[in-house]
Image (spheres, rainbow, N blue to C red):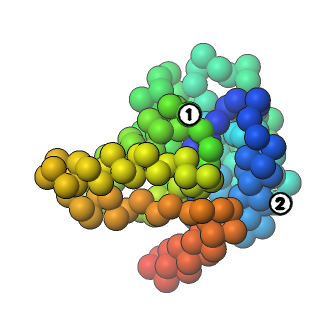
Amino acid sequence: MNIAVYCSARTAIAPECFTDARTLGEWIGSHGHTLVYGGLAMGLMEAVATATAAAGGKVTGVVPATRMERQHPANTLSIHVSSLHERKQTMEEQANLFVALDGGYGTLDEVMSALASMSFFNEPKPLLLLNRDGLFNPLMEMLGEMVRRGLMFPEVLSRINLCPNIANLTSQLEAAEKQFAATNE
């Protein structure tokens, strides 16, 4: 599977965020999957890519032309793009499923873009959000309100899976891995 991971490029965040990023990367690599991510040696992106590569996985970095000097040396493949829009589109097209770790407005933008693309093109893929300490609860409340007001179909909201911790997230990845294998035999 190609697993797109959206996460923070910042370093001044809680240490457990880095621990979870490394755990996810180890899972991706040890299960023979490919990480698809923003391609940079920064913050959680660096942690998940380094761990994926160290565990034997492939690493596809989608690197903006303006940040090529910061691309991660662990990238097995670097895809250079000219804009954030192209970066998001490329990651969405490459991925079989999406994971969001801790992140800010860039991560939120990527999550919403993936959700909108899946919905618009009716190509549902798993979307797992690590909901540490309720980070994504306000987003789910807002989307729920949109459903209540008839602004969004309920099935769109049901495509988002909140994971309270990294163990739950990797458990859901294992289930998705089995389903992916069964549908691609």
Residue 25: which disc? none
Q: Which amino acid does the dot numbered 2 rest on?
A: Ala
Residue 104: which disc? 1
Left or right of 112? Residue 130 is right
Q: Which amino acid does the dot numbered 1 rest on?
A: Gly
Q: CA distance from mark 1 to mark 2?
A: 27 Å
Residue at 49 percent of width and 79 percent of height: 179
Q: Nearer the viewer, residue 72 or 47?
A: 47
Mark 1 or 2: in front is 1
Residue at 63 percent of width and 69 percent of height: 168
Left or right of 107? Residue 174 is right
Q: Quadrant of residue 169?
A: bottom right
| Residue 149 in picture, x, y percent from top left | 15, 50
Is 181 placed above or below 108 here? below
| Position of the N terminus by quadrant | bottom right
Residue at 19 percent of width and 55 percent of height: 148
Other-residue count near label 2 (Cα within 10 Å), few / some / many at <14 / 14–19 / ≥20: some
Left or right of 176? Residue 114 is left
| Residue 116 in picture, x, y percent from top left | 31, 46
Residue 55: which disc? 2
Answer whether residue 147 is visible to the viewer in this image: yes
Tell me the SS state at disc 2. Answer: loop
Other-residue count near label 1 (Cα within 10 Å), few / some / many at <14 / 14–19 / ≥20: some
| Residue 118 in picture, x, y percent from top left | 33, 53
Tell me the SS state at disc 1. Answer: loop
| Extreme-right residue of the structure | 54
Residue at 44 percent of width and 79 percent of height: 183
| Extreme-top residue of the structure | 66
Answer whether residue 90 is visible to the viewer in this image: no
